[in-house]
Each structure stands twice: as structure tokens, then as C-alpha cells.
Image: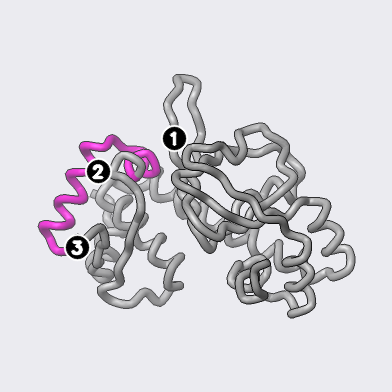
């Protein structure tokens, strides 16, 4: 069973008391998924969330033409599936294990039981949902309003902010864990165009690639992120 610290590391549970965190740990159940295994599909019943302990999960939609649009990737230390848990609607996207994944599942029934005895659960959930809404708004803005160079820069900065908070250190490093094809799908662009931008960023010193880790010029990326041309 994970420690209190594991559950407290998730935004939705961070404000809870030690007693409440112990109750979450007791109610959650371990699960594992093999590479390529589907956790859930769009329109499936949304009656549980998962706190990811290890691995990476691809969140995507399949268009009518059969094209997969990757919305984002959820990694260890993130939570997945909470929206459907609270609005009691079906899943809004597909979730697939990219590699081996382990996590802890909390059902709607278990959450409602916990929250019935402690209103702090609902307050914490509202904070989490507000964060998700802000993140989604930023992603939509990046795709709709900016050219590709700015979209790539904004994506990198948003990802770094998720790791470091708003105060990103200069020369912060990022192990993105996405192929350039997956990154292209997230940004709503073609792979060759994204490849060209990434190479331009390397040539200009905005990112320095070493053993799969990108060291980023934060000031330079912020300048690019506001560009419209």
C-alpha cells in the first residue's frame, strides 16, 4: 500500500488531512496494464480514477476517418479519469498504456463514501478540476491562435511548468518521452513540419539534446511562445 506521501503528491489529495489520506490508501486498489492495453475507451462508463505509480498512458481520440489524435500523455505522478468520475458521464477519450503501467484505482463509490464523511474531498476535487480546465484552455489557445514555432515553444513551457511550477529554472531539462510523430499529433501538425521546427530550435540553441534529454533556453522559448508569425 502506498504511503501518505504518495497520495499527497497528487493535487486532488494534497490538502487532505493525514487521516483522510490513510482512508484513500485503504480504499484504493492496485492495477497493472501491459504495453498497448486499453484502460478505457471513449463512451465507456466513467466510474473510477487511477493514480499512476509507474509508466505512461496515451490519451487520444479516433476521428471518423480513423486518424488518432493524441491529446496528451499522462505519466507517473499524475491522475487520470477524474472528470468522468465527478460528472457521471461516459469517458471522453481513449486511454492506452504506452509501456507497462501500474497504478491505484479509486472507484466512484469509494470516493463518494470518503467524501460523505469529509467535505474536504469535494473542495480538493474542485481545485483539481479547475486546474484541468485552465490547462485545456491553454492547449486550445496554442493550437487555434499561434503558428507552429510558437505552439512548440508553448507546449514545452507548459510541460516544464507541470514539472517545476510557474518559476521554471533557466536551462531546465526535459525528458519528453514522446516521439516526434506523437508530438505532431498533440500540436495538430504534420511530423515533417514539427521535425523542422525542432531542428531549427536545436540550431538556434533553444534546445540542446543530450541522450534523450532536452535542456531548454527558457527565456528564448518564452520569446518564441508569444510569436504570431
Which residue is painted at 69% across and 75% down in the image?
15
Outermost residue, right side = 117
Lower position in the chain sequence, tag 1 or tag 3: 1
Residue 209: x percent and y percent? 19, 60
Residue 24: x percent and y percent? 75, 66
Q: Which mark is residue 210?
A: 3
Give the prevailing secondary structure in the magenta stretch.
Answer: helix
What crowding class fits label 3: few (fewer than 14 Cα within 10 Å), some (14-19), or many (20 or more)? few
Residue 123: x percent and y percent? 75, 68
Q: Quick check: 189 above or below 131?
A: above
Which residue is painted at 12% across and 60% down in the image?
204
Does the CB distance between marks 3 and 2 fall below 8 Å? no
Q: Which mark is residue 40?
A: none
Q: Magenta stretch containing residue 7, yes or no?
A: no
Q: Quick check: 188 above or below 131?
A: above
Q: Magenta stretch containing residue 191, yes or no?
A: yes
Specify start and end residues of the magenta stretch as a single range.
Answer: 183-206
Which residue is painted at 65% across and 39% down in the image?
91
Q: Secondary structure at mark 1?
A: strand
Q: CA distance from mark 3 to mark 2?
A: 19 Å
Q: Nearer the viewer, mark 3 or mark 2?
A: 3
- Residue picked out by circle 2: 194
Residue 134: x percent and y percent? 54, 58
Q: Nearer the viewer, mark 1 or mark 3?
A: 3
In the drawing, does residue 115 fall left or right of residue 10?
right
Q: Secondary structure at mark 2?
A: helix
Lower position in the chain sequence, tag 3 or tag 2: 2
- Residue picked out by circle 1: 69
Amino acid at each position: 500500500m502506498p504511503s501518505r506521501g504518495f497520495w499527497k503528491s497528487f493535487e486532488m489529495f494534497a490538502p487532505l488531512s493525514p487521516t483522510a489520506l490513510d482512508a484513500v490508501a485503504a480504499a484504493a486498489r492496485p492495477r497493472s496494464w501491459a504495453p498497448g492495453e486499453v484502460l478505457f475507451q471513449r463512451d465507456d462508463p466513467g466510474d473510477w480514477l487511477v493514480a499512476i505509480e509507474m509508466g505512461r498512458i496515451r490519451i487520444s481520440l479516433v476521428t471518423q476517418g480513423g486518424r488518432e489524435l493524441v491529446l496528451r500523455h499522462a505519466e507517473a505522478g499524475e491522475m487520470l479519469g477524474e472528470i468522468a468520475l465527478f460528472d457521471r458521464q461516459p469517458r471522453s477519450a481513449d486511454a492506452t498504456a504506452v509501456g507497462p503501467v501500474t497504478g491505484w484505482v479509486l472507484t466512484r463509490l469509494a470516493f463518494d463514501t470518503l467524501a460523505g464523511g469529509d467535505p474536504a474531498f469535494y473542495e480538493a476535487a474542485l481545485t483539481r478540476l479547475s486546474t484541468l480546465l485552465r490547462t485545456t484552455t491553454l492547449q486550445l489557445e496554442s493550437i487555434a491562435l499561434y503558428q507552429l514555432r510558437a505552439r512548440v515553444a508553448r507546449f514545452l513551457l507548459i510541460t516544464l511548468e507541470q514539472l517545476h511550477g510557474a518559476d521554471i529554472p533557466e536551462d531546465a531539462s526535459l525528458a519528453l518521452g514522446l516521439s516526434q510523430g506523437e508530438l505532431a499529433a498533440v500540436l495538430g501538425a504534420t511530423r515533417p513540419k514539427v521535425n523542422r521546427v525542432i531542428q531549427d530550435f536545436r540550431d538556434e540553441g533553444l534546445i540542446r539534446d543530450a541522450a534523450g534529454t532536452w535542456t531548454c533556453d527558457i527565456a528564448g522559448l518564452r520569446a518564441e511562445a508569444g510569436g504570431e508569425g
